[in-house]
Amino acid sequence: MRKMLSFIFAALYALSGCSEGESGKAQTETIDIPQTGMTEAVPADYLSEAKRQGRVERVDYETLDYAGSGGKITKTAYVYLPYGYDESDEAARYDIMYLMHGWGGHAGEYFEFGSVRIIIDNLIEKGDIRPTIFVSPSFYHSGSDTDFSSSVSALRAFHSDFENALMQAVEGKYRTYAESTSDDDLKASRDHRAFGGFSLGSVTTWMIFCYDTDYVRYFLPMSGSSWYYGGYGDFQTEKNVEFIRELVEENDLNERGYFIYHAVGTQDTVRSQTIMQAEEMLRYPEIFTPEHYVFYEKEGGRHDFDAVQEFMYNALPLFFRGAEKQEIEPFTVNTKIADVINDPAFGSYGRLLFPADEGYMSGNTLGELRLTWYSNIDPDKTVEIANYLRDEAASGRTVFYDIYSEDEKAADPNKRNTGLFFFKGDEGAPFAVCNAGGGFAYVGAMHDSFPHALELSKMGYNAFALIYRPDWETAMEDLGRALEFIEKNAETLGVDPDGYSLWGGSAGARMAATLGNAQYLRAYTDGTVPQAVTVIMQYTGHSEVSELDAPTYACVGTSDGIASWRTMKRRLDTLSGYGIATEFHAYEGLSHGFGLGTGTTADGWIEDAVEFWKLNKGAA
């Protein structure tokens, strides 16, 4: 049977071809996998708790007993909200997927058994899928009989509950792409809705396909076939597939778009019925093309949640690909700073793009941004940074990492104003941590660390910009925690844990120099972090010096009224006397806080600094 299916699917895939286009138009979406095959095993790191975990909430809702008396009843569903979901962020929108259990199951079980929730967390954290809401409802209620016959009756009636109560209860409370819970708005948002299920939940999924393609575009039936006609032991496969085929044609679904990922294990007790439906559907390659229907098996898979989690790992990255993309206007110099902070792509961390203490900044737009003690703020660079970070976040890539746990932040609320913005370079390349200044009164990242990190990422280096608590002691604690976080998660982040550099301007330069010292590094970390191979520092009066300091590059302006170039040069001369590599530049006429120095006498200094880093990394 398996060899025959492989031959049929390979031939059909070759005949079918793929095309792509925009949602809601006469088009199909490209699916970059063969129409049939074996699922890939879930990688080990997807089975370990993610750093950024979603949360699960209970929703009780009023509905009718559609499988019984027809009277009013209360049912329960459990809702997974992705990490960063913020009730106050009214602009954010999320795709949504409903997941139905099997015989004897219950609401919420997808978040209890196996590693389904952990896999979802990791798929989102690693950028495989967009942040998505998942719902685990039930076709049962508190008074349901759960014998097999009653369960089949309940699942057959569930589509009415789904259409008339469940979607309204969940999507009226949480932010999906449905503008409201009116029937028209629920239908208009079908491209952002999926339904899946296991065992009798798979049968339910096929029922939802038969009744509700006006509401749902993506389907994941796992270990089960359609029982629109017939039932267990009376599968009526040909009649069911004929009904589905006619439904697709009569409702123009190939034009409107739909996608089914059908899956079963090779050792599953219901494999035979699932195979029969797969064979029958693939007899119509002009209807069930690879863009609309694929069939996959788990080698050795049984009728259990081990199979479910593997099916979800393989299927979910293929969902919501055909969803209509929102046209996003790029930020400009005229974009209000408040609009950047509140952009839904940034979630709750948008406020940390700019100083948490607004008393040290001024200006209403990106072009008007001013920061206390800083000169040469480049509006075009500010706009570039804001657009880069939003584009990365909107593409599902993680651009912000917490360095403290929720418990630690609850104990010290000031720790909520900390974290690392990540500017991704080449996979496995060395990393830099950039620390903005601000006189230990605020963090001027938009001018004094974000631009540096962005330019380093363009050169292929991985760069982090630290948002810290602006006090000497807490700043050192936060930098130490950030270094521990990066070192412990180097593989996940895709960075080389050895040979890193510390960068900083003004107060941030003091931080870099302090933890660039081996003794202070040990004092502020857990002892597992190696010393930086290079410290890159700008315009600071930091004068403490030690034989345990790292090789140091320094630059400053000769007209800096805050940090004297002579003080900086004396310190580097002392380091050189200890046999520590140094490089010093004083730029004529520049004042404090020139940042990248674009268009000034310091223009290009960052390339010199990188060469110094490379030289000392090679010598380490």
Image (spheres, rainbow, N blue to C red):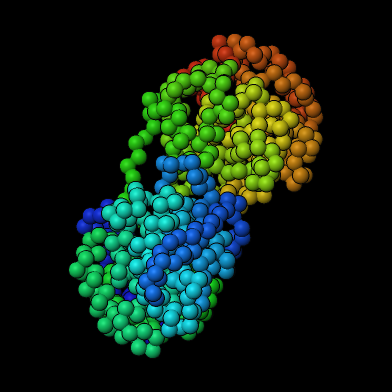
Q: Residue 317: x percent and y percent?
A: 43, 59
Between 196 and 388, which is closer to the camera in this rendering? 196
Whether residue 545 is situated above or below residue 205 in the rendered picture:
above
Whether residue 390 is situated above or below residue 234 in the rendered picture:
above
Whether residue 464 is situated above or below residue 509 in the rendered picture:
below
- Left or right of 521: which side holds 273? left
Q: Which residue is drawn at 57% across and 69% down?
A: 113
Q: Quadrant of the C terminus?
A: top right
Between 571 and 173, which is closer to the camera in this rendering? 173
Q: Residue at x 53, y 58 (%)?
A: 58
Q: Residue 50: x percent and y percent?
A: 59, 55
Q: Is residue 534 visible?
A: yes
Between 432 and 178, which is closer to the camera in this rendering? 178
Q: Residue at x 52, y 46 (%)?
A: 84
Q: Is residue 498 visible?
A: no
Q: Indicate the quadrant where residue 529 lies.
A: top right
Q: Indicate the quadrant where residue 229 lies.
A: bottom left
